[in-house]
Image (cartoon, rainbow, N blue to C red):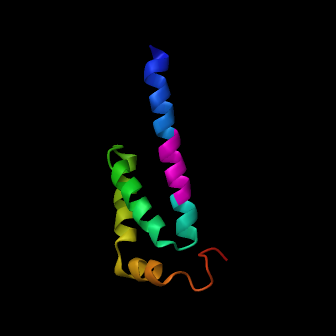
């Protein structure tokens, strides 16, 4: 019974974790797809009350700001956010 329930949960957690890692790497490189992926993952994180909700609201708030949208539209000046 545990294998029937546990296996899909492990696969789901690995997929979500992989998507979050890919989004984080993409955000560091100012990729526009990463902003959308992170918005989707933050929206899913809103269901994790209370800490996930707080993180999700903050992430969504940051990523929908006009300055952030314009940064990702034109890309990072030197190709990445990190220095």
Whether residue 21 appears in magenta in the rendering, the answer is: yes
Q: Residue furthest right?
A: 83
**Number of residue marks:** 0
- The magenta region covers 14-22
Q: Of 55 and 70, which appears nearest the observer?
A: 70
Which residue: 52% across, 68% down? 27
- Residue 17 percent coordinates (x, y): 52, 46
Which residue: 63% across, 74% down? 82
Q: Quadrant of residue 28?
A: bottom right
Which residue: 53% across, 40% down? 14
Magenta residues, dominant SS class:
helix
Which residue: 52% across, 81% down? 75
Whether residue 18 appears in magenta in the rendering, the answer is: yes
User: Which quadrant is home to the C terminus?
Assistant: bottom right
- Residue 10 percent coordinates (x, y): 51, 32
Residue 28 higher or lower than 46, as above or below:
below
- Residue 52 percent coordinates (x, y): 39, 48
Q: Is residue 7 left or right of residue 42?
A: right
Q: Is residue 22 left or right of residue 62?
A: right
Residue 44 higher or lower than 80, as above or below:
above
- Residue 77 percent coordinates (x, y): 58, 86
Q: Is residue 61 left or right of residue 74?
A: left
């Amino acid at each position: 019974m545990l294998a029937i329930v546990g296996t899909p949960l492990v696969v789901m957690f690995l997929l979500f974790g992989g998507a979050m890692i890919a989004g984080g790497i993409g955000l560091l490189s100012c990729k526009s797809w990463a902003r959308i992926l992170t918005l989707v993952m933050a929206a899913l994180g809103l269901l994790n009350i209370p800490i996930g909700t707080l993180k999700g609201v903050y992430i969504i708030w940051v990523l929908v700001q006009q300055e952030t949208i314009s940064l990702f539209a034109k890309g990072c000046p030197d190709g990445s956010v990190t220095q």
